[in-house]
Amino acid sequence: MTSTEPPTTDRADQQTAHQTDQEPAAKPALRPTRQRRAVSEAMASFEDFRSAQEIHELLRNRGEAVGLATVYRTLQRLADAGEIDMLRSEDGEAIYRACSTTHHHHLVCRSCGRTVEVEGPAVERWTSAIAAEHGYGEVSHTLEIFGTCPACR
Amino acid sequence: MTSTEPPTTDRADQQTAHQTDQEPAAKPALRPTRQRRAVSEAMASFEDFRSAQEIHELLRNRGEAVGLATVYRTLQRLADAGEIDMLRSEDGEAIYRACSTTHHHHLVCRSCGRTVEVEGPAVERWTSAIAAEHGYGEVSHTLEIFGTCPACR
DNA sequence: ACGATTTTGACAATCGTTCTCAGCGGGTCG
DNA sequence: CGACCCGCTGAGAACGATTGTCAAAATCGT
Ligand SMILES: [Zn+2]
Ligand SMILES: [Zn+2]
Ligand SMILES: [Zn+2]
Ligand SMILES: [Zn+2]
């Protein structure tokens, strides 16, 4: 998790749900396809942050070819589900990485990409406090630290 | 300032560049053109973060037409010079705002864009400490808080 | 197996941003 | 002022990441 999830706009499903009732909304339940499995596995094979295109490329090299569009779609879903972290490189591209499921932030090496997950309860509290102090609600935040790792000094 | 400047590219010549010559290399010295003045003035006319295209549009409405490419170029320069802050909206677009020159972060309304500049000495210290703790050097960071402002609740 | 539903993928379409390059204009020097 | 140098501008092409399209393929519940 890179940022606290703001109660994102949950658009209700628009298909006539037949089966038994479910207050919130019954989830379609994703299907375990070869492609989705391949992407998930690929995500577990590297430690740094990579772009959708790089991951697509990685899959191709592995022989487990998956359409680019599918890679984009799958990564987005995984990110929305909180199964992987997504953040934006300095040039605005979305980059992904498999991370622990707890809320945390990143210390990324600007040179080799080596990433360390860090936690800062104090910071979390601070952001909440600041937001509340100004009357802002549904707060979320992004915090990333960039630097040069020991090996790249 | 949205993030600490990573000792990237330029560094020695922050605002120390004076009239007298310097060893490194003489600066071409930007030219005060109508377009640049227009963009700077436009930036001073609003409080929230806006995209290059929106600023270009704003200029057009003001009658002070400026080419889109020039708007992009000028905004980048102002941002590089630290005269305005640039950050990325959640969808990756670059958005700009005239800010105070001291290092600070933002509490941005996800709905109307209303922004509050906030400071957090503790956070600054925390990021430095974390980085040092892991042996990372030349540290910089980005931290933005998003929420819904009182008026948009 | 069968129909309903979801997913896929090749390709087109967006869209923000950058590149090109001929023409313009500010600054300078004589 | 006039010639020049060179940064600056802008219209449009080019780019590159991401999304949309939609017919064909895969899955699921029965
Ligand atoms: Zn993470
Ligand atoms: Zn956090
Ligand atoms: Zn600012
Ligand atoms: Zn800071």
Image: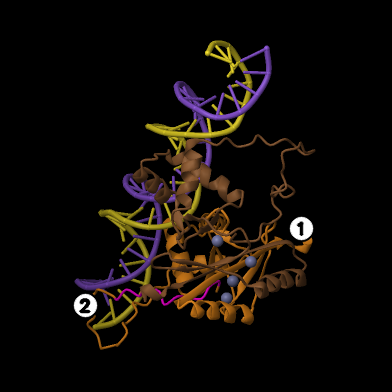
Chain colours: A orange, B brown, C purple, D yellow
Where ligand 2 lies, by image quadrant?
bottom right
Q: A79 and C27: which one is in front?
A: C27
Say whether marks 1 and 2 touch (CB < 8 Å).
no
Q: Is mark 2 within 8 Å of ligand 1?
A: no
A45 horizontally vs A72: left or right: right
Which picture quadrant has residue A88? bottom right
Q: Secondary structure at mark 2?
A: loop
Write the residue at 61% across / 58% down: B101
* Chain under numbered label 2: A
- Residue type (three-letter) at the residue carrying disc 1: Cys
Q: Main secondary structure of the magenta part?
A: loop
Badge nearest the viewer, 1 or 2: 1
Q: Amino acid at mark 2?
A: Thr
Q: Quadrant of the C terminus of chain A?
A: bottom right
Q: Earlier in the sequence, mark 1 or mark 2?
A: 2
Give the quarter of the image for residue A58. Answer: bottom right
The residue wearing badge 1 is: A152
